[in-house]
Image (cartoon, rainbow, N blue to C red):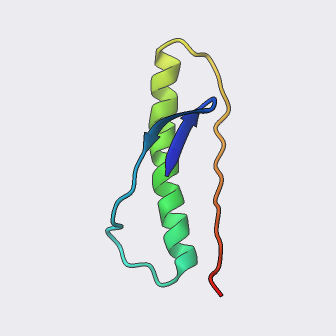
Amino acid sequence: YCLFLDSNLICWSSRKQLAVAISSTEAEYRAMAAGIAETSWLHGYVICLGNSSFPLLSHLYSVTTK
């Protein structure tokens, strides 16, 4: 996942998943959940720094292979 603040990349992560997913869709949702958990933590941190509010957006880009 990649986290952007405005148009600036501030955090990214790529790691092996701990659980085995039965489908690629499940793997994508697990990865998105991990990204949202990180985003929630970062959102609270930025609010503590004085930025009162900003939107949290999540996008899942999935392409099937032919």
Q: Residue furthest top?
A: 50
Taking 30 as reference, is 1 above or below it? above
Q: Residue furthest bottom?
A: 66
Q: Position of residue 28 (x, y in %)?
A: 54, 68
Q: Where the C terminus falls, by quadrant?
A: bottom right
Q: Which residue: 66% across, 43% down?
A: 57
Q: Which residue: 65% across, 62% down?
A: 61
Which is more toward the observer, 8 or 55?
A: 8
Q: Is residue 53 left or right of residue 31?
A: right
Taking 4 as reference, is 29 above or below it? below
Q: Which residue: 68% across, 32% down?
A: 55
Q: Position of residue 19 (x, y in %)?
A: 35, 73
Taking 24 as reference, is 10 above or below it? above
Q: Position of residue 32 (x, y in %)?
A: 53, 58
Q: Residue furthest front?
A: 66
Q: Position of residue 65 (x, y in %)?
A: 62, 83
Number of numbered discs present?
A: 0
Q: Quadrant of residue 56?
A: top right
